[in-house]
Image (cartoon, rainbow, N blue to C red):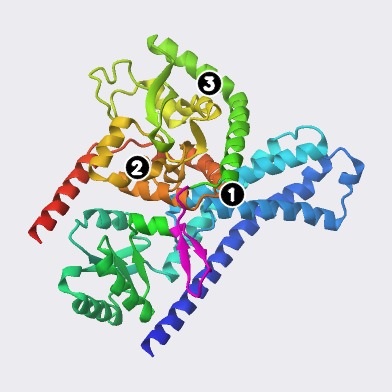
Amino acid sequence: MNADRNERKLRQRESLKRLVNLCLSGICLGLEAGVFAYCWMNHFRYSIIEEVWRQLWFKGNMLEIAIYAVILVFLSSMYGGLRLGYLKNVELIFSQIFATLIANILIYCELSVMATQLFVPDVFITMMFYQTIIVMVYINAANRIYRFIFPPRRLLLVYGDRPTNGIYSKFESRRDKYIITGAVHVREGFDAVCAAILRAYEAGECNAVLLGDISVKDRTPLIKFCYARSIRFYMLPKITDVILMGAEELHVFDSPLLLTREYSLTMEQRWIKRWMDIVFSLALLVIASPVMLLAAIAIKIYDGGPVLYRQVRCTVNQRHFYIMKFRSMRTDAEKDGVARLARKNDDRITPIGRFIRKCRIDELPQLLNILKGDMSFIGPRPERPEIIAQYMEVMPEFIYRMKVKAGLAGFAQVYGKYNTSPYDKLKLDLTYIENYSVWLDLKLMLLTLKVLLWPDSTEGIESEQITALREAKQRKQGNEEEE
């Protein structure tokens, strides 16, 4: 009975949460579409040259407004502008403003085609200004309302022998969404852990369970326990969990069968992906050529050193190739021959290099690598052989990310940060590899536009990451020896 009551309660809460989210987001989108409707009715439609467009009837006007609304909803959903309570307030506002900007650019192009000439952009700029004000004011208010109605989840952490500092720091950064109110060690035994979960759940100290990095042997009975009692639980996935996410379900027998193929992309997917790489890289080379020329001149004038920087990286099947980038560091950045990843506030980066790194201009020469076939537009970022060797000392699974071509941008760059830990980067890259589709590539290309402007994605990594991995492995080996 308790399980049924919990399930009904959770279902009602989720339905209410979705309804509130849709209503609050719908109001914001409606206000933005209303601004466009006003501009269309009073400005845009009178600028169309053809008489038939000038005298659009009521249904025609509504159709144009509806087209804009659909584009805005699609982009807002893709860039996360509708994810109240999920993203941080600043990121939510940024996402919605960015989605609105892209929608306005697309509708500007459409109206320019209809008018057979470029529209004067002054009304569009004014429209964007008012929409930005609406987004900033309304989302601030809507997010407060949403979080007042739905306070942060209170979590009971079930942890193992691995340090919990990383887990606490991650969840501490999102106290608006999750609060860890208690913790219990899995070594206390299954019965004791279950009793602690029930006690905290019934006392209202927690309303969900967080399963940390514990063994599959310990985790499986706890999953069944929570599932049977309709207790919500979150789980930090292991590498094998991520691989199984992309498994294909077969119904050959009278029981489900999961298939994980020995190759990641089918022949058709590889062919389509390659043609997409060629078309998009050629188009971007043409569009970005003025920016690339200016960057080359600035680098040369600054210190007279070489403009391009060639470096050995690894792509599919650990094949070596020379990646090309605009040089952003001093010419003696690695004079001792030791490979080092860029760090936060790295003093080897020149002022010009800092700017082109921030704007990602330094990556543009890699379009030539894509044309050549060494890289793809989307895929795991290519690493240096020396760095891969260091990672594989403590994490042999790191080689899995080289089952596909390296990419200019990837899943880990969109959903992680530049300083995301190697283990988490691997899980993100495997999520891409095991769930690949052409649509996923297109979606990640669009999301990369947002990432380029978001500052977190351009930070350097912490130099302690590999050391921390080594220490974690040593602790694990020590525990195994004790057992």
The residues bearing labels 1 and 2 have C-alpha atoms spaced at a distance of: 25 Å
Residue shown at the point (52%, 30%) measured from the top left: 373
Residue under label 1: 439
Q: Are marks 2 and 3 in contact (CB under 8 Å)?
A: no
* The magenta stretch spans residue 250: yes
Q: Is residue 141 above or below residue 270?
A: below
The quarter of the picture where residue 217 lies is bottom left
Of circles 2 and 3, the one toward us is 2
Front-most of 339 and 19? 339
Which secondary structure lies at badge 1?
A: helix
Please report the bounds of the magenta region as a residue range: 245-263
Residue most extreme to the front: 253
Report crowding for label 1: few under 14, some 14 to 19, many 20 or more residues within 10 A (C-alpha): few
CA–CA distance between discs 3 and 1? 29 Å
Q: Which residue is mark 2?
A: 399
Query: If the image is split into quadrants, where does the C terminus sit?
Result: bottom left
- Disc 1 marks a residue whose amino acid type is Trp
Q: Nearer the viewer, residue 172 or 129?
A: 172
In the picture, residue 242 is in which quadrant? bottom left
Is residue 305 located in the magenta-colored stretch of the structure? no
- Select label 3 or label 1 by which is in front: 1
Image point (27%, 62%), residue name:
212
Is residue 11 left or right of 217 when viewed as pictured?
Answer: right
Q: Position of residue 165 (x, y in %)?
A: 21, 54
Residue at position x 76%, y 41% from top? Answer: 111
- Which circle's residue, 1 or 2, is located before the other in the chain? 2
Q: Earlier in the sequence, mark 2 or mark 3?
A: 3
